[in-house]
Amino acid sequence: MSVLAQAATAVGASFLLFLLLFVVAIVLASAVRVLREYERIVIFRLGRLQGIKGPGLVLIIPILDKTQKIDLRVSVIDVPKQRIVTKDNITVDVDAVVYYRVFDPVKAVVQVQNYFAATALRAQTTLRDIIGQMEMDALLSQREVVNQKMQRILDEETDPWGVKVSSVTIKDVSLPESMVRAMAKQAEAERERRSRIIMADGEFQASQKMMEASEMYTRSPMAMKLRELQTLQEIAREKNLIIISPSGGNMGDAIAVATAANRRRAGES
């Protein structure tokens, strides 16, 4: 019996030693943290802020220390589509993208409960506020101005949270179908107006040139005679005619004779 008792005692001691080693391994594993280059942890010991640590190998006191990990990389918030009424009472659907990063992990943990949710909600309200103060034409033509204004306001408001808003971009502006049709009609009317202006300007320039040509022909009868001959040549080529003009005769009589002859041939055929 003494031998069995000794064996049982040895087994119990070995089990206790194994259990102790297992507990020590768990404690050591929970006390060691390995952080990447872009990661930091904020440490609270018994509720008191101890600071931030990282990157690399970090040791903490299990049970006593509570930590919260913060990612310092640039993150993206996809602002969902918002239905907003513009200054000129037009309803539009607008969505945007916000790029931000945490520059102060302590503020991001201590000053705000959830910096991601707070920044996302603030981006939605800021988007509504800015577009609500703009007219639709300005919104469509000045998107970059809206982006810069929204970025500046968000950056100022999230600075106490340790968050830096680096960029804001409006993704899409959706208009009601009736407004799209009205804008299409307006664009068509504008194109028609420009077309008529161009045609009127062309007619005005052509009339000026014709007036200048008439003045030149008046000053030079020989030039007028050459122009008449050229006109007869073009008519003869297009209508397949032979026009005979007597020397020194009246050009108008020659044209009348040729036209009458052509009509007679057309009637006989």
Image: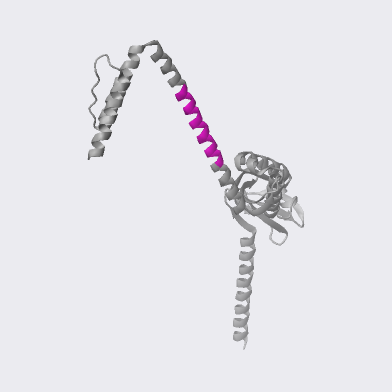
Q: Residue at x 68, y 43 (%)?
A: 135
Q: Is residue 213 above or below residue 182?
A: above
Query: Which quadrant of the figure contains the N terminus?
Result: bottom right
Q: Is residue 55 above or below residue 220?
A: below
Q: Residue at x 60, y 72 (%)?
A: 18
Q: What residue occupies the far top of the structure in this picture?
A: 219
154 left or right of 206 in image: right
Q: Is residue 36 above or below residue 147?
A: below
Q: Position of residue 116 (x, y in %)?
A: 67, 53
Q: Position of residue 10 (x, y in %)?
A: 60, 78
Q: Quadrant of residue 238?
A: top left
Rendering colour mode: one colour
Q: Nearer the viewer, residue 74 or 251?
A: 251
Q: Reply yes or no: does residue 205 show up in magenta.
A: yes
Q: Nearer the viewer, residue 11 or 149?
A: 149
Q: Is residue 66 above or below residue 122?
A: below
Q: Which residues are magenta?
A: 189-207
Q: Position of residue 228 (x, y in %)?
A: 32, 20
Q: Residue at x 52, y 32 (%)?
A: 197
Prevailing secondary structure class for the magenta stretch in the rendered image: helix
Q: Position of residue 264 (x, y in %)?
A: 25, 34
Q: Reply yes or no: does residue 252 show up in magenta.
A: no
Does residue 243 appear anywhere in the picture? yes
Q: Nearer the viewer, residue 236 or 244?
A: 244
Query: Which quadrant of the figure contains the C terminus?
Result: top left
72 left or right of 63 in image: left
Q: Nearer the viewer, residue 236 or 183?
A: 236
